[in-house]
Image (cartoon, rainbow, N blue to C red):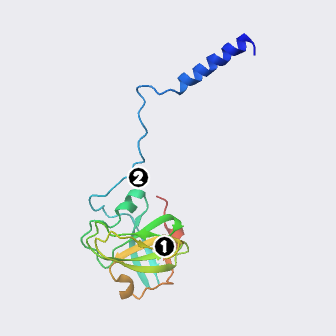
Amino acid sequence: MNKINAITMVCLAAATFVGCSKTETAKPAAPPPDRYYMPTQAQPKLPTIKIYLGAEVLDTELALTPRQEATGMMFRTNIPEDDSMLFDLHVPQAASFWMTNCPVSESAAYISPDGVIEEIHHFEKNDSIPVVATNNNILFVLETADGWFARHNISVGTVIRGEKGSLPESIPPP
């Protein structure tokens, strides 16, 4: 390598090093806003859609964003018979829900991507132990007043539909 090429290489290396160094005014990247979010109060009523479970109809709140999902029905001290919340998990998985900061027991249906109820569970108030689905094909979770599914004769295998057809077609994007 000749002397000019060597000097050029040293200058390029120095420029690269200087260009990659941090300045005093650079701020560290902030964590994603909802990554460490811990709710401290009940959220206001969320937008709703009508869902159909056999002959039953529910105006169901939609928990679509990470913050809405994290809060769910926490801190609500009363869940009327016709209140419910639907969670869109965005990808099929072995759903895992718990009742931390939920002073009222609930029932929940774990639902497949095609809108079929795969499992129904009782959630005991303030229980921090997760209720994990027995399979990894759960895309939606529907929370209702405790015992709602039994009182309305809704069982595993029931297909849930929305206003626009199938459950996935009826849920707007977050």
Q: Residues within 10 Å of mark 1 (few under 14, many from 20)?
A: few
Tag of residue 35: 2
Kind of residue indicated by mark 1: Glu
Above-or-below relation of 116 to 169: below
Q: Position of residue 24 (x, y in %)?
A: 41, 25
Residue 104 lies left or right of residue 21; in this view the side is left
Q: Is any atom of residue 164 visible in this view?
A: no
For the N terminus, the image quarter is: top right
Q: In terms of secondary structure, where does tag 2 sit?
A: loop
Q: Residue at x 59, y 24 (%)?
A: 16
Foreground mark, 1 or 2, reads: 2
Above-or-below relation of 83 to 101: below
Return the residue at label 1. 163
Q: Between residues 144 and 27, which one lies in front from this camera angle?
A: 27
Q: Position of residue 56 (x, y in %)?
A: 42, 83
Q: Which residue is farthest top?
A: 3
